Image: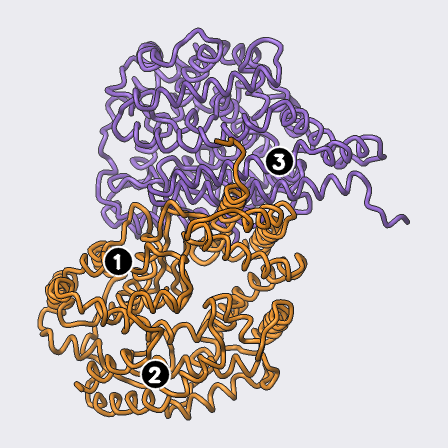
Chain colours: A orange, B purple
Amino acid sequence: MSSTPSCYDSLCTKNREITLLANTYNVLDWDQETYMPSGGITYRAKQLAWLSGKIHELRTSESFRDALEGAEEENSDATQAANTREFRHHYERATKLPQSLVEKDSEVTSLAKAAWAEAREKSDFASFAPHLTQLLDIARKKSELWGYEDEPYDALLENYERGAKTTEVATVFEQVSDELTETAQAACDKHQSIPDNLLQGHYPISDQQILNREIAEDLGFDFSRGRIDTTTHPFCTNLGPDDHRLTTRYLEDDFTSSLFGVLHETGHGLYEQGLPSEQHGLPVGSAVSLSIHESQSRLWENHVGRSRAFWTKWLPRAQEIFPHLTSLNLDTFLTSINRAKKSYIRVEADESTYDLHIILRFGLEREMLNGELEVKDVPEAWNERFKKLMGITPPDDAHGCLQDIHWSMGGLGYFSTYTLGNFNAAQLYHHALQDKEIAHACAQADYSPLLGWLQNNIHSKGSALFPQQLMKEVTGEGTNAQFHLAHLKQRFLGA
Amino acid sequence: MSSTPSCYDSLCTKNREITLLANTYNVLDWDQETYMPSGGITYRAKQLAWLSGKIHELRTSESFRDALEGAEEENSDATQAANTREFRHHYERATKLPQSLVEKDSEVTSLAKAAWAEAREKSDFASFAPHLTQLLDIARKKSELWGYEDEPYDALLENYERGAKTTEVATVFEQVSDELTETAQAACDKHQSIPDNLLQGHYPISDQQILNREIAEDLGFDFSRGRIDTTTHPFCTNLGPDDHRLTTRYLEDDFTSSLFGVLHETGHGLYEQGLPSEQHGLPVGSAVSLSIHESQSRLWENHVGRSRAFWTKWLPRAQEIFPHLTSLNLDTFLTSINRAKKSYIRVEADESTYDLHIILRFGLEREMLNGELEVKDVPEAWNERFKKLMGITPPDDAHGCLQDIHWSMGGLGYFSTYTLGNFNAAQLYHHALQDKEIAHACAQADYSPLLGWLQNNIHSKGSALFPQQLMKEVTGEGTNAQFHLAHLKQRFLGA
């Protein structure tokens, strides 16, 4: 036995150092979003830029390249091959970006996030526009450097969804767009007479936190390895292999807003907590793609969290915590939380209208990246298309093009994965329920067999396969929108 | 004009990078103490070790040394000379420690802090003892590497108090020890009949937070550049030039515990917020020493915060927030918060007995470092000496040798600066009040002239001078314990 570590081992050590710095970046970023005082922003941007620069330096170092080239010549098992494949992919991506661009990206993003939060509060798109222009400029530069076959969006989408193509996504979206619009329209019409205020009341934040935590814990989220904090835009982030932070926001007059937010982030958190720990710091130990990540959050939020079985168990507990709900029966409650209604804010949209929000953003982003839509024209384009899809016009940009944090984070090419995630969620849930034991347990609101199935089939696989390969392995086919359409029709139209 | 930066400029750039990493370390450390889930500890230790290692690498790099040697040859003004002097000092200290020791130190400390928190909770010294042994071992190694004239404590004290000598501190402590003990004894005897429960009641934490924040803000703490969170052991830390985090802990049956904690940390925070911002990241932009830092916290906590003028203003507000206090008059309230009483916990000790706690720790630490006291014998030695000084024996180690976080942080040589800080606080406050305008404003509970005096004389000076030089410049003499003794006698014995 040789005592010299293989090139592959040395590559793993290098990548674990990179991951350690990325997780350190996440601590600073999490703090910026949750607790940092406003004055801290300028220096924090410098700290994040330093870390991004260092990560880029390590990722693109000659010693990384040498180890990579060596590892590619070594014999390998499937895991080793998958890690090496991803090392190569990330190395190619990283070396195509000059360090100056990476550092600028981090600094622009950090400032843009703060500017977005202020612009959104004041509904002042003009103050965010110069940041968006900078962000688009960086995104375009990146896509040119990375290269693409058809259009810039391809190069960005690849960051989130290995192997996906923009035209393929566009084709699927076009195929289902009419049926989604019709379903949403029919659902909204059907639900028009449901009153707005069935759950009206005062829900103290501290009480909401009790219920949210109990439910997240019951679903399997391990609070010794995670927590829930408060932010403007909810997210789930990893500060380490045993430290997963969820965030949410609270409305004092509607406990379901934070609750479904927490269910959603819990879905992300369960995925992260279920990744193969011995592979932490390596590609195979990471989530495979955003559409798979989102499939987990949407599965728990919608397929589980909006079901009759779930609330048969949890409504009595909610009534204990919020006594004024005692008079509400289960049917009325379910009607209220599954009410289809046209609305302006994506994260508050019901399931029937949600994907229309995504289709809107996907189109606008493509055009911005292709130079077919100028930043200054975004609010008008947003409002016009929103009116076409949803039949209503946002009253201001805070309810329109300023509502989402993603662009301010440089997250262009990201939104389409939400709807792909919805498709995957329905498809995976459908397949899990083919197991009678799982179906029986879910009907009793016992979700540990379902979690076990997801852990075995999705979480523990990490990034060993490409997302579409994983879908095929687990369900026998790639992403198929029909499961989602069937789910929506059943839930909203009783079909 | 040459466009090449001077060696001094290049040295400053290098040091600002080191400071950026140190502030990043502080973010991770702050998070560990406030919000991190328990499962995160192992990975967090690795992250902190990486940062410590990188800081050490940069501090001891050849390029740092070359720039330092160059800067020492350049013409310089007073600020430049002070920075260069401190660069040399820190460089010498850093290069004497091998990187392996620095990394080990960080990892041992991170684990020891978690072990201490658990040991304290369970009052289980045995579970902390192996950590303390490791910490002492590292401290002794460091002091040997740094070198000292008389004893290991010297080398450690120099970290906190530039230019101080252990034997000099010991001599001052011996000189005042009897008078302090007598004053404490007389005060405790005099106050023996004051009932324990004058402020008894329920004080919801959220209400305590309202009062604490209002007071900290009124004293001048800028919440756009800082915040207050909750920890087991309160502290103040810097995450950047405009981001100062205070922490406190709450007792639901005694609002004064968190309030005086916040006043104390506010004193630290005001000092940090008043440092010369153009010097941030350089020695002159940093606090000069712990005894000066502690003079600021104790001045605001005790000289301001326990005074009649202060509570003439704030008791009515406290009564609004906590209505059951309405029946309490000002005299009774002052009697209660300035009550001398023998107690086990240093951070809850009144002013008359506080320094006895410090004298105890100072003696034990010296002996542990000199190898005269073994770790396993610490609880017994603590309890015996505590009984001698205070006349009472701690009921368990949580109320004895496990009560403070400092050793677990590797903070050996640190405690003596608390009592030096008390001495400096009394001396500085006495001198500030020689200004009639300041004295008049303080009598009206308007502390902005006092803060202005401290900003001009202490805060804005940073580390330009050594602490004892600074004391001489501001008060005409080095640290003089007589001001503190006079203050205690006046407050507790009406002398």
Q: Residue at x 61, y 83 (%)?
A: A371
Depth check: give the residue in front, A137 or A19.
A19
Which residue is under mark 2? A343
Rendered image: mark on residue A209: 1
Depth check: give the residue in front, B393 or A491.
A491
The image quarter in which residue A301 lies: bottom left
Check the residue under mark 2 and report the chain it is in.
Answer: A
Residue A405 place in picture, x, y as percent: 47, 69
Residue A487 place in picture, x, y as percent: 24, 79
The image shows residue B471, relative to residue B165, as above or below, that is below
Q: Secondary structure at mark 2?
A: loop
Rendered image: mark on residue B458: 3
**CA distance for labels 3 and 2:** 57 Å
The image shows residue A193, relative to residue A64, as above or below, that is below
Kind of residue at badge 1: Gln
The image quarter in which residue A45 lies: bottom right
